[in-house]
Every structure is written in structure tokens, then in C-alpha cells.
Image (spheres, rainbow, N blue to C red):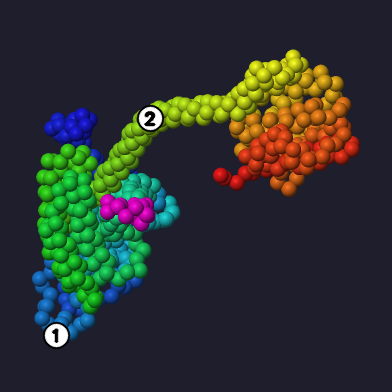
Amino acid sequence: MKPGTRAFWRPDVLARFVRLLLVCGGLLAAGPWAWAADAVVHYTRAEMLREEGPRFKPLAAQVDEAALPGNWTTVELPLVIPKSAALPAASPAASGTAKPPLVTTWLRVRLDELQGMRTPTHFYLIRWLAAGQIAVYADGKLRYRSTGSPVWNLFNHPALLLPLNLTADSAPPRTLLIRMDSLPSPEAAISSFYAGDSNSLIEMAAKRDWLAYQLPFMSSAAFLAVGIFSLAVWVIRRHPASLLLFVIALMGAIRRWHFQLGPEKLIVSDAWFIWLTLNALMWQLLALHHFMQLLHGRVMRRLGWLMLGIAVVFSVITLPFASLVPSLLVIRPYAHLLLISMGTVVTAIGLWHSWRSPSPDAKMLSFALLISYVFGFYDWARLKYVLDLESYYLTPYAAMILFAVFVVIMFRQYVGALATVEQLNSGLEERLKNRETELAASYEKLREAEQRQTLSQERQRLTQDMHDGLGSSLVSALRVVEGGRLSEADVAEVLRGCIDDLKLTIDSMEPVEADLLLLLATLRFRLGPRLAGAGVSLQWEISDVPPLPWLDPRNALHILRILQEAFTNTLKHTRATQMRVTTGAQDGYVTVTITDNGGGFPVDQALAGGGKGLANQQRRAQAIGAEIVLTTNDAGTTLVLKLPEKRLPG
């Protein structure tokens, strides 16, 4: 566990956090009321009259309070209206009706304190709870009536803010009559109320509305948006945590409908509304249990299957196919007991395993579950009218705490994923550096091996070339000299030829990079002085030609010796005074053409006579896949060397 997380779970830190929650709860219970004391009157006492009978009296546009049957009794507000025991449940009238009878409760308040006010006034009722409807009469005239069915009015937005007089020149009413029609079971309740200056009461109602309804609603909407985002992630990645987060957010939003609904009725019926809000909490608890297992790592398959079976059975047996709304209202308290039991199991098991787990996320979520459980039990006690009726419901704020915890968990998971990626990237970089070092060492060894192989091949080539060219010429010259058959001029000519062979061998070692023109320039540099000494002018008409990829030192030496032999034959066997060298490209060949003006000679006789010069040229041309075309006439001799641009392998 990280040090910061361990510090959060110290007893003193937890105690301060609990005290903070208690202070916040006290502020919520007190309410942000700020109004002028003489402008608003808080009414905590009223007179009550109950009408109980098999018949329900419809609402009237005008009521005479003196004509109402029964006696008025003084009661304190807030007031819990007990279940009715006076109705004849087995009477024919009651049993034969399609709808159950309603109990009508009248409350009467004298507004004597408002009579001196000459400003617009309002009536503000904090909360009323009844499986029925409510109507407000001012001086006997109907001023407001609730809409919707009895079940809907038990859940919808409970605050009631009504204008008593709209202008300063009109006097506020003297008497308010409040009529509540409700089913005999469950109990109904009504809070105290305020009357007085319109601005003060509108501000009071707006503050309470924002804290009690708008703020939790915005949090619930944000949580649902996060859940939808998680569902989109699950569609792509199929990670169970994303799907569970969506289910938790969706079920939480559905569960808290009755805390956030306004007077507008939804498209679902009352029976389906009760079924949805009851079962949403069951499935949310199941999803929270499985999400907790992902965090603390302890999987309890049997308990998971048992809870799933309970949720399925509970959802099936409470299906409102027959639309028995009163029956659902009767079983609702027992359903709450089952939900409290299931919440106790989920919270206790989550706390136990999370406390033993090293995961701080599991500890945070289990602590949030504990707060939600305490807040939920508090709201259940309020619904049983054990606690103050006018205080705030805490379950919506528990949902805000859950939302905050899930945001923190998502943030920690995101930051942790980034850290993991960074760590992996760092490891990959280190491995890449090591691999690059290994590859560099391997390449160096390979380069050294290739260099050794190249040197070995070059050594073998030079050995062969020296043996076939320079060595052969020197041996021939030595034998002739030893035989005394050559003059000094002939010996000099033989030695000059040997030197030319040596120079060509050295030139062939220079890298030409598939550039034939560079090779020809080297040949011109070597033979130019010799041609000038023999009185032969050289016309160099070179044009650009395609590169020859196969032009390596061995093949370059073959080309140099072919062309050297052509120059040598011209100097030895003709009386040429001019030679011309041209290049070109045609039909996949690069051509080198050497032309002289020394008069022709019979080529067929030269080949048949056993001359080695022409034969060596043909042999070297075949070695590199080239062709030699030799033509002669009285004007001179032309040699065309055709070099292929691409050679076939082998």
C-alpha cells in the first residue's frame, strides 16, 4: 500500500472525515434559510378533521369549512397521519369497488399574521407524503390540486410553493384549508409550512430545491454519462469492470427517480415505476458486489450465484402484470427489509475483504458503501416516520459519494495505466538499446567477415590476373631475352606492355560504382600519353550511359584489357594518326566504339593465323556477357564493345 493511502486509513484521519460528514449533515438538516423574521411566518400548528367512509367525495371548486362533518382537533406539525382503522373493509360497497377507498384529511390554518402585509405573499409546504392527492383552498376557493395518480404523488417532487396574493393591493387569504386524500395504508404525512413575503419564500424554496434535488440530479446525470462511456469502452474492450460500472450508474439513476422527479409524470405506469425503483437497487447491489470482487480479488462464486438467484426471483415475483398498485404498496416495506438485508451482506463482505486487501481502491469503495448503507438506513427510518420529516434525504448524497469514489478509481486506474505504459516503454527502450548494441556488434563482426572475404577474393583475383597477365608477359620476355632474339627496342616494348598490364590491374581496384564513364576516364588517363608519344590524336566523344550494376573490379579489368588490346592493335599493326572513342545506349546494351584511320586488315586471316590479341578479346567479352563487333575497310578499323545493362545471374 502506498504511504498516502495508508495515512488516509489511520483512525485520527477517519475520525476527522466522519466529523466532517456530520457537520455537513447538520448543515443540510438546518437548511440554508435566510429571510427577514417579520416577513415569513412558520406555522407548526394546525387544526385537523378526518373523513372516513366507504364513499370518496370528489374535489369541489369551493368548500365551506363550517359544512364539513366532524370535529376539528389541534395538531402539531409535522404531522404523521396514522393508518385508518375505522373503514369497514368487508362492507359490500368497499369490496365491490374496483378501486380501494380513500381517507380524506382536512387541515385548517388561520393566517392572521399575514393580514397586515401589503406585499405579494406565498405559501410554502416543504414536504407531503401520501399515496393519494392534495388540494389547497384559500378562503374556501380551490387554489391548487395535485395531478397524477395516488402512487405517483407518493414519490414525486414533494415541495409545494403557491402564491396567496399576486399584488400588493390585494389582501392575503384569512384561512387555508389543505385536503389530503390517501389510501388507508400506508401512513401519510405532512410537514410544517411557511407563509409570508414572496421573495423570501421563493429564495428559501430555490435553495432547498437546489441542495435537495438539483445537485443530486446533476451528479446522477454525470454518473450516468460516465456509465454510458464505460459501456462504449466495454463494447470495444469487453472488460467486465466497464460493464459493471455502466450497470451501477444506470441502476443508481433509476433507483433515485423518486428523489428527483418533478410534477411531470413519466411515460411508465405507477406499477412499473414501483417495480423499476425497487428492483434497480437490487441489481445495483449485485453489480457493486461483483465490482468489489474485481478490486479486492476475492471471488465468492456461491454467494454471487445466490444473490443473482434472489435478484431474478425478486424481479419476477414483483412484476406488475395485473397492475395491482395497492398490493405493491403493501409489499413495499417488506421489499425494503429484503434490500436492507442484501445491502448489509454486500457492505459487510466488501468491508471485510477490502480491509484485508492491499488495494486502496477496494478500501475507498467499501467505505463509500458503508456510508451509503448508513444513509440508506437513515432514509428508511425517515420513511417509517421515526426521524424528522422535514430533514433532507441522504441517499442522493450517498450516490454523489459513490460517483466521486468511482471517478477517483477511474483516475487512479488511468494514471496507473499511464505509469505501466511508461514503465513498459522504458523497458522496451532499454531492451531496444541492448538489442541495438547486439546488432551493432553483430554487424561489425559481419562487416569484418565481409571485409576479410573481400580481401581474400581480391587477393585471389590479383593473383590470377598477375599470373595470367603480367606474369605471363614477364615470363615470355625473359625467355626471349635469354634467347637473344630481341633488340633493345623490342625489350623496351615488352616491358612497357608489362607496365601497362600492371597499371590496368591497379586501376581495376579503384571503386567505379557501376560507372562506365569513370572507368573509361581512367583508361584515357593511362593511355593518353602513350598515344600522344606515338603521334596519334585522340577524339573523346563520350555521352551519358545507364549505370552497369554488375561492374565490379574483376569485370572492370576485363573491359580495360579489351579496350587496351584495341588500342595496342592499332598502334602495332596500323599507321593510324587519329583514334575516336564514343559511347551510346541502345536495345538494352551500352556500347563503346573505337575507330581509327589506319587502314584496314583482314580480320578472318588474323583470327585464322593464331593471333592471341583478338582471341583474348573474345574470351574476355564472353566472360562478362558482352559482344565484340569488329569491322575493317580501307579507311580504318572499328571495334564496338556491347555491354549488357543487366546480366543474367550465373
Residue at 82% x, 39% y is 602
Task: Label 1: state its secondary structure.
Answer: helix
For the magenta stretch, what is the residue range?
Answer: 229-242
Task: Label 2: state its secondary structure.
Answer: helix
Amino acid type, callout 1: Pro
Q: CA distance from mark 1 to mark 2?
A: 99 Å
Query: Residue 238 at what x, y percent from top left?
Result: 32, 55
Residue that numbered label 2 is attached to: 438
Q: Earlier in the sequence, mark 1 or mark 2?
A: 1
Is the C-beta separation of discs 1 and 2 under 8 Å? no
Query: Residue 122 at what x, y percent from top left?
Result: 35, 53
Query: Residue 52 at what x, y percent from top left?
Result: 16, 73
- Among the 4 quarters of the image, the one containing residue 463: top right
What secondary structure predominates along the stretch shown in magenta?
Answer: helix
- Among the 4 quarters of the image, the one containing residue 315: bottom left
Q: Nearer the viewer, residue 329 or 49?
A: 329
Query: Residue 266 at what x, y percent from top left?
Result: 34, 66
Residue at 87% x, 40% y is 633
Q: Quadrant of the N terminus?
A: top left
Amino acid type, callout 2: Glu
Residue that numbered label 1 is attached to: 92
